[in-house]
Image (cartoon, rainbow, N blue to C red):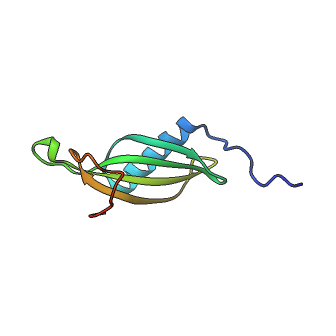
């Protein structure tokens, strides 16, 4: 039986750092941090929280979650915004109204 997928060459922490760098370069947005890193057959899926719109006071900032796909070498495959919400919002995992 042939082996279809090999373990990723980059570690989870390296994938997170690579995803952050790619996303900040492409969007010019300030990343707050990595919220999840998950292995896939082709590499890694990394979720990153980003400040979309700074407001005064900062508790009114608009944030977003981006999903970034990284290959086994840390190269960007794809990215997409999955959610947008206010910093003070308590229900980012619920209904996706306004995304």
- x, y percent for residue 87: 23, 45
Task: Give the residue drawn at x 54%, y 42%.
Answer: 15
In the image, farthest residue toward the bottom: 98
Viewer-closest of 37 and 28: 37
Viewer-closest of 82 and 76: 82
Quadrant where the C terminus lies? bottom left
In the image, farthest residue toward the right: 1
Q: Is residue 78 left or right of residue 94?
A: right
Task: Give the residue drawn at x 23%, y 48%.
Answer: 89
Viewer-closest of 1 and 95: 95
Task: Give the residue drawn at x 67%, y 42%.
Answer: 9
- x, y percent for residue 60: 15, 47
Asked which quadrant contains residue 2, the reply is: bottom right
Asked which quadrant contains residue 31, the reply is: top left
Quadrant where the N terminus lies? bottom right
In the image, farthest residue toward the left: 56
- x, y percent for residue 76: 53, 54
Q: Is residue 71 left or right of residue 47?
A: right
Q: Please count the marks in the image.
A: 0
- x, y percent for residue 62: 22, 52
Q: Is residue 98 left or right of residue 23?
A: left
Task: Give the residue drawn at x 37%, y 49%.
Answer: 24
């Amino acid at each position: 039986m042939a082996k279809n997928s090999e373990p990723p060459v980059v570690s989870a922490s390296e994938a997170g750092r690579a995803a952050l760098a790619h996303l900040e370069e492409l969007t010019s947005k300030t990343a707050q941090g990595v919220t999840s890193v998950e292995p896939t057959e082709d590499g890694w899926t990394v979720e990153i929280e980003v400040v979309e719109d700074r407001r005064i006071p900062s508790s009114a900032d608009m944030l977003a979650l981006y999903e970034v796909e990284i290959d086994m070498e840390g190269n960007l495959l794809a990215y997409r915004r999955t959610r947008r919400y206010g910093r003070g919002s308590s229900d980012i995992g619920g209904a996706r109204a306004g995304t």
